[in-house]
Image (cartoon, rainbow, N blue to C red):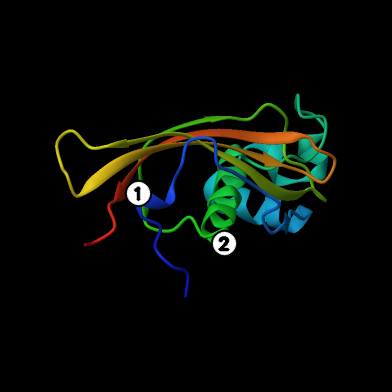
């Protein structure tokens, strides 16, 4: 069982590197796309070759789901996303092994609820070649440690 993280566990400038890696396969991409994002660039090699992706690429939402799994597997449990900004600078491809590089950019007490605080996190989903597949900025609500 993963321990809950409290506001007091976060410090501006903290960096976390080297999370576990998750590999993305052709089958993963096509299965996700068939269910959640059935666009040609995600459904088959043949269809994807005719798109601006010029080959099979994971849906951004697939990359986001994999990223969320990596966040939780890295122990960031108990934070409630209040705002998320995502960018996908390069497409996630079959064979990519994604990991996280994460930095805490802001920590502050809540103005409206003394039992909570706000943490801002920036994290990149990076493949084995150092190529950033997703950039994420999260503003999260985090409980304060019980007395």
Query: In this orientation, which residue lies closer to the viewer: 51 or 29?
Result: 29
Position of residue 78 in the picture relative to residue 66 (left or right): left
For label 2, the SS is: helix
Q: Which mark is residue 69?
A: none
**Residue 13 locus on image (x, y percent):** 54, 35
Q: Which mark is residue 7?
A: 1
Q: Which residue is drawn at 78% across and 42% down?
A: 93
Query: In this orientation, which residue lies closer to the viewer: 65 or 98?
Result: 98
Chain-order first, disc 2 or disc 1: 1
The nearer-to-camera label among 2 and 1 is: 1
**Residue 84 locus on image (x, y percent):** 43, 34
As drawn, the residue found furthest toward the bottom would be 1
Q: Residue at x 77, y 53 (%)?
A: 26
Say which quarter of the image contains residue 110: top left
Query: Is residue 19 placed above or below 118 in the rendered structure?
Result: below
Q: Are there few (<14), some (14-19), or many (20+) residues within 10 Å of tag 1?
A: many
**Residue 88 locus on image (x, y percent):** 63, 30
**Residue 55 locus on image (x, y percent):** 82, 36
Position of residue 94 in the picture relative to residue 73 (left or right): right
For label 1, the SS is: helix
Q: Residue at x 69, y 51 (%)?
A: 30
Q: Marks 2 and 1, how far apart in space?
A: 19 Å
Q: Quadrant of the C terminus?
A: bottom left
| Label 2 sits on residue | 73
């Amino acid at each position: 069982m993963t321990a809950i993280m409290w506001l007091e566990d976060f410090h501006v400038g903290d960096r976390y590197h080297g999370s576990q890696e998750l590999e993305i396969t052709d089958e993963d991409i096509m299965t996700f796309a068939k269910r959640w994002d059935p666009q040609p660039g995600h459904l088959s090699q043949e269809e994807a070759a005719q798109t601006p992706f010029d080959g099979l690429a994971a849906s951004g939402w697939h990359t986001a789901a994999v990223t969320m799994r990596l966040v939780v597997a890295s122990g960031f449990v108990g934070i409630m996303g209040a705002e998320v900004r995502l960018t996908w600078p390069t497409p996630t491809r079959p064979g990519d092994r994604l990991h996280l590089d994460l930095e805490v950019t802001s920590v502050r007490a809540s103005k409206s609820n003394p039992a909570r605080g706000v943490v801002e996190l920036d994290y990149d989903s990076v493949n084995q070649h150092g190529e950033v597949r997703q950039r994420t900025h999260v503003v999260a609500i985090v409980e304060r440690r019980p007395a």
